[in-house]
Amino acid sequence: MTPALPPGSTIGIIGGGQLGRMSAVAASRLGYHVHILSASTPAPAAETAAKLTVGSYDDPAVLEAFARECDVITFEFENISAAGLRQLEALRPVHPAGRILEISQDRIAEKTTLSAMGLPVASWRSVQNEDDLATLKDFGFPLILKTTRFGYDGKGQFRVSDETAFQQLWNDRQNLPYPLVAEKKIDFARELSVMVARNHHGDIRCFDPSENRHRDGILRMSMVPAPVAPETIDEAQRIASCLAKDIGLVGILGVELFQNADGQLIINEIAPRPHNSGHWTQNACIIDQFEMHIRAVAGLPLPSTRRHSDGFMHNLIGPDDMALVPAMMEEDNAALHLYGKAEARPGRKMGHINRIFPRGGLPGEHALAQLQPVHPQE
Ligand SMILES: Nc1ncnc2c1ncn2[C@@H]1O[C@H](COP(=O)(O)OP(=O)(O)O)[C@@H](O)[C@H]1O
Ligand SMILES: [Mg+2]
């Protein structure tokens, strides 16, 4: 049995973004040093870490030098090449395993794996070429075409609402970024997500599911408790726990779910790392998703995920939201988390605010709407 990583050890985190930044804070609280590998600078994660290496995630010399300085390696960024993953795994323990990252990198591998585990996914078709594209007429509309790799924040997606929209896409068929996956558009009642952590002893802990709202493909807010029946909470956690066990997770993983009109849960996608929709845990739980992730990776016990409060997380996106920060600084029972990014470009995640309420005290829809940043253009 692998012993727990002693304090003073070095945890390597691949990726230089805000998820790495907040993971590094959790790791340093537990007495670890953090070494960040980032492909670019400035790297938000580097500011809260002991060491930064800047280099390509696919350069064997960079990966080797980085791995040799770490005791264990994890990720905040998913798109490392298969060869890079193999190389890292040959040198040091890597959690979650490279094989899990490879599944989450490819929407087709992801859906195939989840279906084989008996877990629910939206009906889908692989679209490798024009011939596959032609068959979508009998698959039916509305549908969403997604690039199989490298999509995030709704990028690389094409919504095809009806046959007319399909015809336009067909005219442009030579320019589509194959391979693609076509998914039936789910007429969901709400989107939920669950963060699940598992350590190498096989202990599994799920946080409460949050309800998540997106705009323009980007997460805007998460709220906990999600307004769903207790059975739905149990079912979401059951799905996440089965997945963590069957896939052999060591670390944390976010499961994005749709709840359809008849209450059924369907997995949208998975992310084997801390997740934006789990940021509420920072202020509504004693142990948040970042510490749970580091504990799992370091072979430490996983304590309770119990929530002491209700929470409402709102992302701060681009210059418009950043303009609201001075007013937010004045709020009581609200924790601001800023990522230290110099340039507030439109659509860029700059930080988030966690507004915390006593259990049972999460305001209703109308009152929550008053708390959201409001911009003149909306
Ligand atoms: N099959 C679908 N039906 C309805 N909405 C969808 C579907 N797939 C994606 N979406 C919407 O688009 C958002 C982003 O899609 P997702 O597949 O999660 O991509 P990303 O990797 O960019 O997060 C989802 O959170 C959801 O709001
Ligand atoms: Mg998503």
Image (cartoon, rainbow, N blue to C red):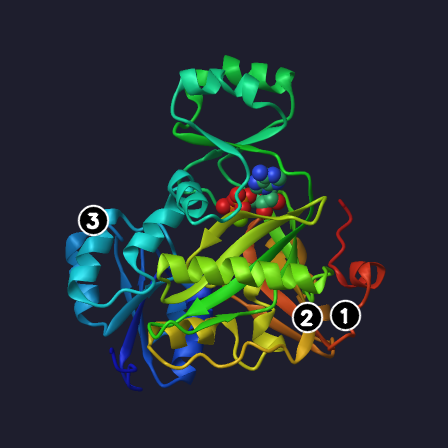
Most extreme residue toward the front is 118
Q: Position of residue 240 (x, y in %)?
A: 50, 60
Q: Kindly report the distance in space between the C-alpha atoms of the residues bearing marks 3 and 1.
A: 47 Å
Residue placed at 24% from the left, 54% from the top? 85
Q: Position of residue 307 (x, y in %)?
A: 63, 77
Local SS, label 2: strand
Indicate which disc, 3 or 1, sits on the residue closer to the N terminus: 3
Is 155 displayed left or right of 375 in the figure?
A: left
The C terminus is located in which quarter?
A: top right
Please tell me the numbered disc located at residue 362.
1
Q: Are marks 1 and 2 in contact (CB under 8 Å)?
A: yes
Q: Position of residue 180 (x, y in %)?
A: 43, 30
Can see residue 118?
yes
Is 368 displayed left or right of 186 in the figure?
A: right
Quarter occupied by residue 286: bottom right
294 and 8: which one is in front? 294
Please tell me the numbered disc located at residue 83.
3
The N terminus is located in which quarter?
A: bottom left
Looking at the picture, which amino acid does disc 3 mark?
A: Ala
Is 10 displayed left or right of 109 in the figure?
A: left
Residue placed at 81% from the left, 59% from the top? 365
Indicate which disc, 1 or 2, sits on the residue closer to the N terminus: 2
Q: Kindly report the distance in space between the C-alpha atoms of the residues bearing marks 1 and 2.
A: 7 Å
Looking at the picture, which amino acid does disc 1 mark?
A: Leu
Q: For the residue carrying disc 2, how many other residues have a C-alpha within 10 Å: few (<14), some (14-19), or many (20+)?
A: many
Q: For the residue carrying disc 3, how many other residues have a C-alpha within 10 Å: few (<14), some (14-19), or many (20+)?
A: few
Q: Kindly report the distance in space between the C-alpha atoms of the residues bearing marks 2 and 3.
A: 40 Å
Q: Position of residue 49 (x, y in %)?
A: 36, 74
Indicate which disc, 2 or 3, sits on the residue closer to the N terminus: 3
90 and 49: which one is in front? 90
